Image (cartoon, rainbow, N blue to C red):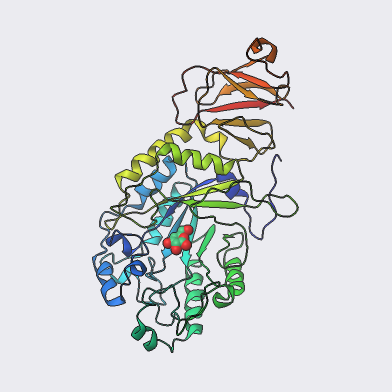
Amino acid sequence: MAFEYKDTPGDTEWFVHDRFGMFIHWGVYAAAGRHEWVKKYEAIPDEEYQKYFDHFDPDLYDPVVWAKLAKEAGMKYFVITTKHHDGCCMFDNPLTDWKVTNGPAGRDLIAPMVEAFRNEGLKVGFYHSLIDWTHPEYTIDGHHPLCDDEEYVKANQDRDWDKYVEYLHGSVCYLLTNYGKVDYLFFDYSYSQMPAKGLLAAGKGKDDWHSEELIALCRELQPGIIINDRTEIPQDLSTPEQVQPAEPLRNEDGKLLVWESCQTFSGSWGYFRDQLDWKSPELIIKMLIDGVSKGGNMLFNVGPNGRGEIEPRAVERLKAVGEWFRVNGRSIYGCGPSEFTPPTDGRFTQNAAGDRLYLHMFSWPFKHIYIPGMADRVEYAQLLDDGSETKIMPAAKVSHGHNQVDENTLVLEIPVQKPAVMVPVIELFLKQ
Ligand code: GLC
């Protein structure tokens, strides 16, 4: 094995192989079209938020289309918001009335999605919010949408937290019992460092969620499931959000930790009509490569709209990402960090067997790529997109007056024209 991960309670083998997943933030907030936190950001009381529930009518929803798009983009698993912080369940949760089955959607929206993605061969992940801004027993803290409304806070001091915990565990139990095999559970999130203030309760964390029992419940119902770190008890993987870690994450023994960065197109997770700062397909591909070169996955988000469609801005970009994957996928799937140091503007990934190294070039230099210390290591090199040889030049041959190249430096001769893919990959077959 070229790279080795620290052992975890669940089985992450498929996860570190698959590398690329689709995050889906979909809920009644899509009807507002202004972020999934709109209830908090605009301090919207329940009575007023109701209008989004009443107008969330996903008449164009076809999860088969979503699943095919994810697959075409190169994604191997998906994670869907079963409930976000607004508390509204996207599934037919028998423990509440605050669910889309009671609105214009009139049905469990999760079940057909699970079926569609599974049919396309993708693994199934559920996002479930620990936080709940609507449940009548969720104690009011500084995150609550109405935390600045003194009257409201005063009137809601007698909430029974145990009842919420029972609801949370019961909902998770339902999700892990009624949808077949669930491969991944993404809990969101803990904030126990937030202090209590006046009548506002402190933030919540592992003791509040009864995280140990919650995790035990998940493992009992779905052996082999993998669970993220946001219950405040580290489990199988960590989930850096909208950030690219600078280095591979390791434990004290130097073993790699499993991680997955979650990323968005434009900053918001839920559908945001007027947010215009969209990432290009090239940037998305580079973020993915950079992550894999550091041992991480990328969970890339779409926020379908209130009619149930993934908007053209997203579709167009995901298709471009998929076109890159079609020819370059083998530098990502089953690959991880390499012990070798890449040249300027390059990122290395290496396959698990350790005999192939993939050089991803974030810019295309003129004529030669120089890789110090690797002259003796490579048997053959080719451009991955068309399988054409990239000549290995003896350092002496390119050394002359103004350009003295160390004999231990691997020199690759490349075409002047950058290959016609967004990020070119050179596949290096290592000497064994
Ligand atoms: C968060 C946010 C959220 C989003 C998520 C994705 O912590 O509260 O809206 O769902 O992380 O990682």
Q: Residue at x 34, y 80 (%)?
A: 149
Left or right: residue 149 versus residue 359 is left
Q: Residue at x 60, y 40 (%)?
A: 293
Q: Please say whether residue 403 is visible from this viewpoint.
A: yes
Locate residue 138, reporting x and y percent: 44, 79
Left or right: residue 381 versus residue 287 is right
Locate residue 103, reporting x and y percent: 28, 69
Q: Residue 352 sits in which quadrant?
A: top right
Quadrant of the drawing holding the N terminus: top right
Left or right: residue 16 versus residue 324 is right
Q: Nearer the viewer, residue 46 or 307?
A: 46
- The answer to whether residue 347 is above or below residue 251 is above
Locate residue 277, reporting x and y percent: 35, 47
Q: Residue at x 57, y 72 (%)?
A: 214
Q: How many numbered discs sit on the rendered protein?
A: 0
Q: Quadrant of ligand 1?
A: bottom left
Q: Please say whether residue 179 is visible from this viewpoint.
A: no
Q: Nearer the viewer, residue 138 or 99?
A: 138
Locate residue 423, reporting x and y percent: 48, 31
Quadrant of the drawing holding the C terminus: top right
Q: Nearer the viewer, residue 170 or 160?
A: 160
- The answer to whether residue 203 is above or below residue 366 is below
Q: Residue 393 sits in which quadrant?
A: top right
User: Going by the picture, which residue comes out furthest to the front?
Assistant: 402
Q: Residue at x 39, y 39 (%)?
A: 280
